[in-house]
Image (cartoon, helix red, strand yellow):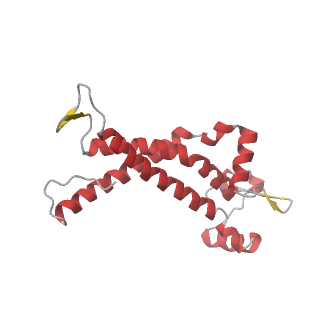
């Protein structure tokens, strides 16, 4: 329904409301059309979550191990630029958002094109996600898989930052209040 307005007037479905859309989709295109793109959507969710969690943990550990220059904070016998605080969580989250954007954009393109594909001579435009990616690379070039990187990152970056800052703060709260650790930091990832 949201993309209907972007179609040329002759191709618009002009649904009256959600119920009208559901009834017409089922009667005109079949019940299983409602799940078109569900598998690529799950694949995208897996890629996003795996990339976010792994890259956040790795970025956080790497940032905690930085040091050896003037603006560093001293921990024991080593010098570090970062300590366990919100600034560390923010920087690690932004790095994670960057990695997640790069990893998930090709999957997101495949998902979106499958969800919006048309039937050509009674056959679907694409056979699956690999077919979408192959056709996109052949027709539009390899780097077109990351077309729109900046706006995608501008959306995903803040989402990732808020997710991990809230997570770290909730972990810190849990450790202090429930576990009774007076000097508890965030952690957990």
What count of labels does the image hold? 0
Which residue is painted at 61% across and 68% down in the image?
17
Residue 1 shows up from this direction: no
Side of 181 where 6 appears, left or right: right
Q: Nearer the viewer, residue 93 or 75?
A: 75
Q: Position of residue 127 (x, y in %)?
A: 75, 58
Q: Quadrant of residue 12?
A: bottom right
Q: Identify the residue at horizontal 34%, vertical 44% (top origin).
A: 60
Q: Is residue 144 above or below residue 185?
A: above
The reply, left or right, for residue 28 in relation to residue 83 is right
Q: Residue furthest top?
A: 70
Q: Nearer the viewer, residue 158 or 101?
A: 101
| Image quadrant in which the C terminus is located | bottom left
Q: Quadrant of the N terminus?
A: bottom right
- The answer to whether residue 58 is left or right of residue 32 is left
The residue under the point 82% across, 61% down is 123
- Point out residue 71 in the picture as x, y percentages from the top left corner: 23, 28
For the view shown, which residue lies furthest in the front direction? 77
Q: Residue 91: image x %, image y %?
A: 35, 40
Q: Picture coordinates of residue 87 (x, y %)?
A: 28, 41
Say whether residue 131 is visible.
Answer: yes
What residue sits 68% from the left and 55% below the top? 129
**Relative depth, front residue between 11 and 156:** 156
Residue situated furthest left in the rendering: 182
Q: In the image shown, does 129 or 67 lie closer to the viewer?
A: 67
């Amino acid at each position: 329904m949201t993309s209907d307005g972007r179609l040329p007037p002759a191709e618009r479905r002009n649904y009256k409301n959600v119920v009208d859309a559901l009834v017409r989709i089922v009667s005109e295109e079949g019940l299983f059309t409602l799940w078109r793109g569900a598998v690529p959507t799950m694949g995208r969710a897996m890629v996003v979550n795996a990339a976010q969690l792994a890259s956040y943990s790795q970025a956080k550990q790497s940032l905690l191990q930085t040091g050896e220059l003037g603006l560093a904070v001293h921990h024991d016998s080593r010098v570090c630029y970062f300590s366990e605080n919100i600034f560390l969580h923010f920087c690690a989250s932004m790095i994670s958002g960057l990695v997640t954007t790069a990893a998930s954009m090709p999957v997101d393109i495949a998902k979106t094109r499958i969800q919006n594909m048309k039937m050509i001579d009674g056959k679907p435009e694409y056979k699956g996600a690999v077919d979408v990616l192959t056709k996109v690379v052949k027709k539009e070039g390899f780097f077109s898989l990351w077309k729109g990187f900046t706006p995608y990152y501008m959306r995903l970056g803040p989402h990732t930052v808020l997710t991990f800052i809230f997570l770290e703060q909730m972990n810190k709260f849990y450790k202090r209040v429930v576990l009774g650790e007076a000097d508890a930091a965030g952690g957990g990832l």
